[in-house]
Amino acid sequence: MSHILATYARFPVTLVRGEGTRVWDDGGKEYLDFCSGIAVNTLGHSPKCLVDAITRQAATLIHCCNLYGIPQQEDLARVIVEDHVRIPGKVFFSNSGAESNDGLIKSARRFGHARPQPNGSPRYEILSFSQSFHGRTLGGISATGQDKVKEGFEPLPTGFRHLPFNDLAALEAAIAPETVAILLEPVQGEGGVIPATPEFLRGAKALCEKHDLLLLLDEVQVGFGRCGDTMAWREIAPEVEPDGISWAKGMGGGFPIGSFWLSDRTVDGGKTALSSLMGPGSHGTTYGGSPLACAASLAVLKEVLSDGIQQNVTERARQIRDTIAAWDHPLVTEVRGLGLLIGIGLDVSKMNIPEGKLPSIHLSALLLEAGLLAPPAGPHTLRLLPPLNVTETEVAQALELVRTSLDQCLSSPANPAGGVRG
Ligand SMILES: *Cc1c(COP(=O)(O)O)cnc(C)c1O
């Protein structure tokens, strides 16, 4: 009997070792890992630069808490602001994506107090979107646009409204006197790999300027190179300047760390910086930004900036898209996403699914048998999230497993896609 709270329906595999894009289970079976711990293992498993950074820092100072100076935080914050975001601002270090979003939500509330409604009461409402995912804290599930994460936890914190994604007219119509911010994922990850359109991102920014709202980007899954550019929003609409950004997942390459950034732009015609609204005592964390976590993240974020990584993301993404397009497979409705966050849309009407199973989970289970880790993204989408340094050969091997497993799912196996295989 397990003593672990059963919040996860896990796949029946236990992983015990990893190296690069490969992992091994407790029976010695090898897998290609295109899950990467859900977009976490940015550089694959146990890359030398990360192991060295962790080893060195662990032998020097692991934790000291935020009551004292932490030089690794200063170094990491400088790299994030100057090299990755490239807009003046300040960062706060947390331990997870949900925590980072909670920080953004609190920052929006502060802004709503500093810039209240005409009647003097604070603004507080955050507009977010259907199918979004923002984490599992009370703040995170309130912001999330999926009912399944909220069931049984009501009453939830108020002050959130969910609108159709990529619908600028609906967004504009929803803005009320109490509205203070717009929160969105540049590419919705858990919700099915759905990128924001450039028009939507630009339009949301224009509405923020017109109505004095904050544009908050949840880059927890997509940030730090996953989508090609180090910031996913810049891959979609580079001229858009956000007011706040949250990250976690890929940021530590497997070591738990999250962060949020607030812009230094002024919010009252020249006196107060947005980032200064979160002053002493406004927020905190015991673990966040430990010397060890920051040293790990520094090693990863420096590597992510190298030309080799960014070029590989672009080339491998093209390889994946071209290969899947060439199959012309009857189960594939479309390939969505950005960079190496890829969603393969499934035509579930043509799939042979065991009673009571979700199509994407069934396909993930078949792939696992075949030797590939690839998670679902909602019921109708298979997600590919290889490490950013995945090789051409590994991509080709993984895609061959995807094609075979798709064939296995076809309801009429007499006519598999791609015809005879050479
Ligand atoms: C995973 C995820 C979160 C939550 O991150 P945790 O580290 O699990 O708390 C929040 N937002 C997005 C977009 C995510 O993909």
Image: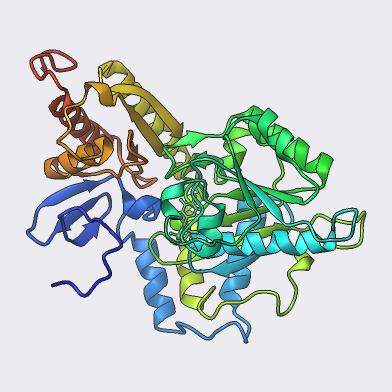
Q: Position of residue 386 (x, y in %)?
A: 33, 44
Q: Quadrant of the N terminus?
A: bottom left
Q: Position of residue 42 (x, y in %)?
A: 40, 52
Q: How many marks?
A: 0
Residue 78 seen: no
Residue appearing at x 85%, y 54% in the figure: 117
Taking depth in this image into account, of 288 and 391 the one nearest to the observer is 288
Residue appearing at x 44%, y 57% in the figure: 249
Answer above or below: position of 56 versus 370. below
Residue appearing at x 42%, y 70% in the figure: 53
Q: What colour-coding does the image apply?
A: rainbow
Answer above or below: position of 314 versus 260. above
Q: Position of residue 26 (x, y in %)?
A: 11, 62
Taking depth in this image into account, of 288 and 238 the one nearest to the observer is 288
Residue appearing at x 54%, y 69% in the figure: 94
Residue 86 seen: yes
Q: Quadrant of the C terminus?
A: top left
Q: Position of residue 306 (x, y in %)?
A: 50, 48
Answer above or below: position of 174 versus 24. above
